[in-house]
Amino acid sequence: MGVLRRTSRDIRSDSRLDVLHAVLSAGETTRNEIAQATGLSTATVATVVGELIAEGIVAETKVTVGRIGRPTATLGMNADRGRVVGIDVAETYVSAVMFDTALNQIASVEDTRDEQDQDPDSVVEGIGRVLDRVLEENGVSRRDVLGVGVALPGLVQGPSGVSVVVPHWTWHRVELDRLRERLGLPLVIDNPLRVIATAELWLGRGRYCSSMATINLGTGVGAGIVLEGRVLRGATNSAGEWGHSLLVLDGRPCRCGRRGCVEAYIGAPGIQQTLREIDPTHPLADLELQRDFIAAMAEAADGPEPDPAVRETIARTAYYLGSALADLVAVVNPEIVTLTGWTTWALGDHLLLPTREHVREQAPGRSAHDLQLVVSTVGGNSVATGVATIALERFLADAGLLTTQIPIAL
Amino acid sequence: MGVLRRTSRDIRSDSRLDVLHAVLSAGETTRNEIAQATGLSTATVATVVGELIAEGIVAETKVTVGRIGRPTATLGMNADRGRVVGIDVAETYVSAVMFDTALNQIASVEDTRDEQDQDPDSVVEGIGRVLDRVLEENGVSRRDVLGVGVALPGLVQGPSGVSVVVPHWTWHRVELDRLRERLGLPLVIDNPLRVIATAELWLGRGRYCSSMATINLGTGVGAGIVLEGRVLRGATNSAGEWGHSLLVLDGRPCRCGRRGCVEAYIGAPGIQQTLREIDPTHPLADLELQRDFIAAMAEAADGPEPDPAVRETIARTAYYLGSALADLVAVVNPEIVTLTGWTTWALGDHLLLPTREHVREQAPGRSAHDLQLVVSTVGGNSVATGVATIALERFLADAGLLTTQIPIAL
């Protein structure tokens, strides 16, 4: 692949993207505020906003008439242009979240998944079922759906084709085509890491820095990386697989087949393994469902007399997480690292401070002294939100509103 | 720091950079070949080349008159426009290499350094001395030097200031100013990792791929990373410190103060440590000078009856290197990884094949199946070459030939 060349057309598209970013993340804004936020001239903003209103993407939500000067219009995304759906296919559940075109969440449904069931037909059917349900339960016609995004764990793409690298999932083009057929709507498919990075870029901290990583903590762990306003995809769409970088050469077995991966220590099953090493007879050591385990850990840590084995487990997890983040800082050296995912929502408050200390101690030189390590401001299911955002981006690109120099999923 | 915005002026500068890259890397070329290599229109190439000739940067070296059509001019860099000097300050030596403006090497001098001597004054004087020598010994006047580049190990920059993070070197702005004064010539200073990435970008494989890492193997180890034609610098100019990412949590002590860093296993002293673990009484285990040790390893491995302990050391080093490269592939997912540095020149042939195997086995999914892992085509001292290239870039920027959207060292 050659180096991307940029043309005047790309710059025009960049201006549109910047304006859309500004409108989306502000919720309500004005032309002047957009000019301030983006650094574009007021003339450019006026032109771009005019086009976006004509195309039904942006709307004037109200007009304020002051005593002096011209009336000021409040702008927002045209929420009623249609609906987009983001589907998060995780190891233990499949979740569909419906959004309006201002990316406000309207409804969601979730099915639990049998972690052992890796039959592609049953995964495809599970995805189809949550999509059908979220539409039916909310009386939304398929005609009103502009696009659906599906985040599939471990999706990669390269010269040798498309595949899904979750252990024992070996999806290729044929399974993806079957999914496309089952859903029957404009579809984008992407990797959860690209997806959370996109959510952070459009709705979180990614717009305001030149380099950022967002860390997903759940069953699996990984990093979505944003450099200079673009999501890093890598040669085979697998950049950010920091969860499968080494913490300990020849250490704990990881479900990817390698030993000593970061994920084997700070993925939810890895955290449970740490508890088991500290106290093999601990009542939480045998909880079967991962999310129950993490919720119980949070509860035990929050009480007035915190469980010592739980506290020690959290302390070691923060050490593992901090050490692994120091590696990410060493290689990518981002300005900001945000934490997301369901382990973060449950344990983030306990992990954040000690992890920050460990990163600063262990990253090379002073590279982490000015690092901001924070919990993501993109709440809820950031995977579903992110992949719905990509579906919206794809709709805008297909409608000719963005150029395709922005690589958009599959 | 905000996201960089791009303007038409940047695009014009990009065209100049592309043309300069094409001329520099081809040595001799024509306007048509430049258009083919860069994808620019022949009209744009003609304009840019005309400007570069008028400014004395590019020259027509000969004109070929065919039987049909217009005569064809052969173009090259105007080598005699002046001289640039690249200075590589390493742990064990300081080396100055002089180039013409076509980046042909003209001369070099080298002093050994006492690894224990970390007094800034003596480092500054050591740098000044090799610069003086390379000019005097070759009868070059300071007037003819367009710029000097100095690569300082561990140089980082951030909101908290500039510092050099080699253990026990604590340089700040004052030491850098002293260096500037001692040399008395236009000066750029950069980190060896940014420097080798720049060399690879201008003169090696970096122009032809969207993502690349070049790995420096010497006393220290690190990665220069190029993404979409730009060198990744990171928030504090310390991106690519992969040598200080973890191979083994709480493993071997590293000279950075952390334990278990990649460098502690595949830096030259780390390789010697591996030999010592295999055979504590091995005659090479006690060689004092690192470069002598690596040269002796190569000799022992090349013989008709290779030394078994040496072979085992090389096998383990390839395993460590492959595992650590798999981590880099997991996070950055580059198309190409090149190896450079003096350990590579000595042992690269022995390391390359087994390392390639280990990377493919250990990188996530199929992410390394299409990875090209090769020895760099930028021969010689790529640190000196790279930092001389940055000095040339800076000269071109100061002369108004490139915009400063390209971040150029200090």
Image: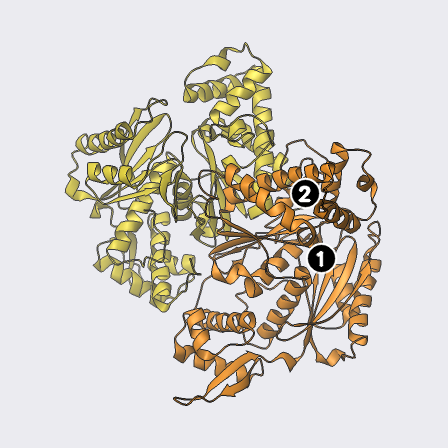
Chain colours: A yellow, B orange
How many residues crowd mark 1 within 10 Å: few (<14), some (14–19), many (20+)?
many
How far apart are labels 1 and 2 at the CA level? 20 Å
At 44% across and 88% down in the image, what residue appears?
A: B66
Does A307 appear above or below B44?
Answer: above
Q: Which residue is mark 1?
A: B152
Same chain shared by disc 1 and disc 2:
yes
Residue A181 visible within the image: yes
- Can you tell which of label 1 and label 2 is closer to the viewer? 2
Q: Amino acid at mark 2?
A: Ile
**Circle count:** 2
User: Which sits earlier in the primary sequence, circle 1 or circle 2?
Assistant: 1
Q: Position of residue B321 (x, y in %)?
A: 62, 42
At 36% across and 61% down in the image, what residue appears?
A: A15
How many residues crowd mark 2 within 10 Å: few (<14), some (14–19), many (20+)?
many
Q: Amino acid at mark 1?
A: Leu
Q: Which residue is mark 2?
A: B266
